[in-house]
Image (cartoon, rainbow, N blue to C red):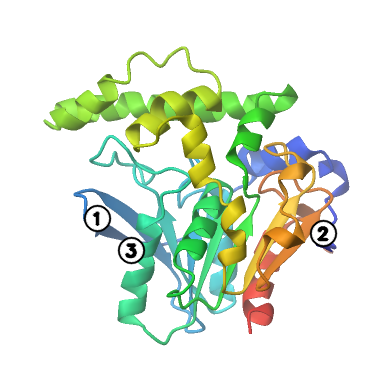
Amino acid sequence: MARSTFVPAKWLGNAHMQTLWPFAFRKPPILYRTRERFNTPDGDFFDVDWYGSGEKGTVILIHGLTGSSSSRYILGLQQALDQQGYTTAALNFRACSGESNLKAGSYHAGFTDDIDQLYQAIRSKAPAMSLYSVGFSLGGNIMLNWLSEKADTLELSGSVAVSVPFKLSNCADKVDQGMSRIYRYHLISEMKEKLANKITFFNANNLLVEAKKLEDLGNINHIKSFWEFDNDVVARLHGFDDVHDYYKKSSCIAKLKNIKNKTLLIQALDDPFLTPSVIPKLTEISASTQLEVTEKGGHVGFISKAKNGQLNYWLETRIPFFIENETG
């Protein structure tokens, strides 16, 4: 396990400050992107926002739970990678691009189909191009599952996963404690609202079979924890027996040793979504995987101080450096 040289800005040393600052105060860059819609084999769709025309390669970017291609960490990294000569494809999971998807289900921690469809589409157009992937939080867990499942067939030059909930049950427990409950409340409220909006959309567009699947879940207003939401909603919509079955099958921790391409895992010990015990041991990762652990950084935060006194979003330096210099 490699300890990182990341040092947080002095006044952002607290894990919650690191986590919340970008959402509350960071002004995202304005990027003029091109959206492409992918129709899926099951009659649904997802959207991808492309940026840049760099010829060094293409980087697939994968957001976290309730995020999108417009999340600040995605926009910042798209800008940074463009400046280094890379094209980026920012995936929106289903129902995350500003429009409802067409199915009652959308995505979950083990759903790798859409990432693979995007990868196959890129590869079919450019078989010899250097291709990379970067996943954040839940998107990182999904990406690592995909890297494991497709290890023998993927042609990727490198991958980076940031702030990953390697053990979903650990994350569900952690956000039930202390100040971490503020994240739980925010995320579950967003997911409830999205489900309510989907029912309205389905009924208005005569998608009555899909609407009934959501209505059959019953009243979910009482749900407060991830254990409850993932048991009563996610597991039921996506064919799992219950929350325990979902967490066991979708947590990436047991699959990390199967990954064959060059992969960097970046985790902070003070991540308010996880406990340090979730960080994989060296015996749990493959020889091609590098684990970089920071003392501070929060959850997808990692804000340091630049030489000019401005804030530096360290991931937008570290990730391009890995892609440029350490994938080989």
Which residue is depicted at the point 50% across and 64% down? 147
Amino acid identity at mark 3: Gln
| Secondary structure under the numbered disc 3 in the rendered image | helix
Where residue 318 sits, quadrant-wise, is bottom right
Residue of label 1: 40
Which residue is depicted at the point 64% across and 55% down? 162
Can you give x and y, in whole percent of width and height, for residue 27 in the image?
A: 60, 48
Is residue 37 toward the left or the right of residue 324 in the image?
A: left
The extreme left residue here reads 206
Residue of label 3: 117
Q: Measured along the vertical axis of the image, is residue 272 above or below residue 83? A: above
The answer to which of marks 1 and 2 sits earlier in the sequence is 2
Instruction: Rate crowding at label 1 as few (under 14), some (14 to 19) or many (20 or more) other CA atoms within 10 Å.
Output: few
Q: CA distance from mark 1 to mark 3?
A: 8 Å
Total numbered labels: 3
Nearer the observer, 187 or 176:
176
The answer to which of marks 3 and 2 sits earlier in the sequence is 2
Q: CA distance from mark 1 to mark 2?
A: 40 Å
Can you give x and y, in whole percent of width and height, for residue 123 in the image?
A: 36, 77
Can you give x and y, in whole percent of width and height, for residue 172 in the image?
A: 61, 31
Residue of label 2: 6
| Secondary structure under the numbered disc 1 in the rendered image | loop
Q: CA distance from mark 3 to mark 2?
A: 35 Å
Pointer 1 and pointer 3: residues touching (CB < 8 Å)?
A: yes
Amino acid identity at mark 1: Thr
The answer to which of marks 1 and 3 sits earlier in the sequence is 1
Pointer 3 and pointer 2: residues touching (CB < 8 Å)?
A: no
